[in-house]
Image (cartoon, rainbow, N blue to C red):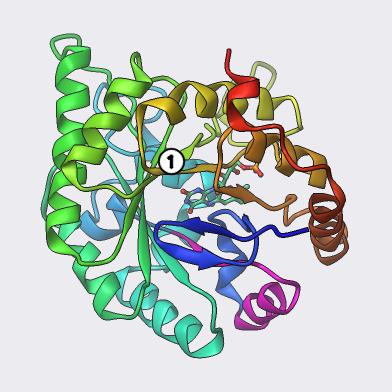
Amino acid sequence: MDLRTTYLGFDLPHPLMPGASPLVEDLDTVRRLEDAGAAAIVMHSLFEEQITREQLAADRHFGAHEDSSPEAASYFPSETVFGVGPDTYLERIRRIREAVRIPVIASLNGATLGGWLDHARSMVDAGAHALELNLYSIPTDPEETGQQVEDRAVEIVRTVCAQVAVPVAVKLSPFWSSLPNLVRRFERAGAKGVVLFNRFYQPDIDPEALDVVRTLRLSDPHELRMRLRGIAIVWPATKLSIAATGGVLSGIDAVKAVMAGAKRTRAPRATAPSPRARWRDARARAAAAPRPAGPRSLRP
Ligand SMILES: Cc1cc2nc3c(=O)[nH]c(=O)nc-3n(C[C@H](O)[C@H](O)[C@H](O)COP(=O)(O)O)c2cc1C
């Protein structure tokens, strides 16, 4: 079955690729992903905090009212977050570019308008074929309106897109109020794609230890449904490439995402016991699955 697709302007043999994660820290793993058929490499993010070297957001996560980009802290232990500074990240892009022939998508993650956005250009200079811009923010200012939050997001996208000649995809959380409108605004601001949806890795509280516990709870296929719904709502409103990430753990999950309108799906979770085997299973199932009836069949 012909699974070819285009994503962010790239002609891909199929729509499966691993989502942004630290898998790319190891070049051998990156090569194995390419060998196993990944359509592209999406790098983990370079976080705003890493660039601005502000106080680690995790330290403020539960008590402060300004948390510009707490996501870095929820993915990695703090020492790991700051162990990978901008220079290391750019070097990693160069090495991955040398190691593989598939498109390399670098990722910037943050939520404020500022100098850190200049790193978009550095990433492209280092060899990134495209950028993923993860707009993670937790609005906590009671004076700031939803409109202002959205306006800032659009300005961030506009700023990044104006700096680089490569395609930019915007990775979003599910909690925006009017997704189709926002996505259309991103399109007008120069974006070429959206990635639905980012996942929150929230800290928990241990009432016995009287402490905050940072745990990473991996997704399950139920989380795909929110993505299917989001994709089906968004795709009639935009010509942007739409990617699904979250809860894609099998080939059938990937087929569902494509039927909803996604052009790219994240592969089965890389942390599963045998990522290669599951990856192959996903490809095989996607190839064997009946041709999708068409995205509109899943519209809500
Ligand atoms: C360990 C780990 C690290 C991640 N790092 C990043 C990251 O650096 N940038 C990003 O945009 N998403 C990151 N993500 C989110 C994934 O790319 C993906 O969007 C999310 O995990 C949902 O997909 P899943 O259900 O397949 O896990 C990370 C996820 C995990 C589990």
27 lies left or right of 192: right
Q: Amino acid at mark 1?
A: Glu
Q: How many marks?
A: 1
Vertical comparison of 54 with 27: above or below: above
Residue 35 forms part of the magenta stretch: yes
Q: Which residue is mark 1?
A: 71
Q: Is residue 230 visible?
A: yes
Quadrant hosting residue 205: top right
> Magenta span covers which residues?
27-44
16 lies left or right of 56: right
Report x, y in % for residue 163: 13, 62
Q: Residue at x 72, y 79 (%)?
A: 35
Q: Of helix, strand and loop, which one carries label 1?
A: helix
Report x, y in % for residue 25: 56, 72
Q: Nearer the viewer, residue 81 or 201?
A: 201
Vertical comparison of 259 with 10: above or below: above
Residue at the limit of the structure toward the bottom, as seen here: 98
Q: Nearer the viewer, residue 202 or 259?
A: 259
Report x, y in % for residue 8: 40, 57
Q: Residue at x 17, y 42 (%)?
A: 189
Q: Nearer the viewer, residue 145 or 245?
A: 245
- Image quarter where the N terminus lies is bottom right
Q: Is mark 1 within 8 Å of ligand 1?
A: yes
Q: Dot 1, how many residues are within 10 Å of its Cα: few (below 14), some (14-19), or many (20+)?
A: many
Q: Is residue 205 visible?
A: no
Q: Residue at x 25, y 59 (%)?
A: 51
- Image quarter where the C terminus lies is top right
Q: Residue at x 80, y 47 (%)?
A: 251
Residue 253 forms part of the magenta stretch: no
Report x, y in % for residue 115: 11, 55
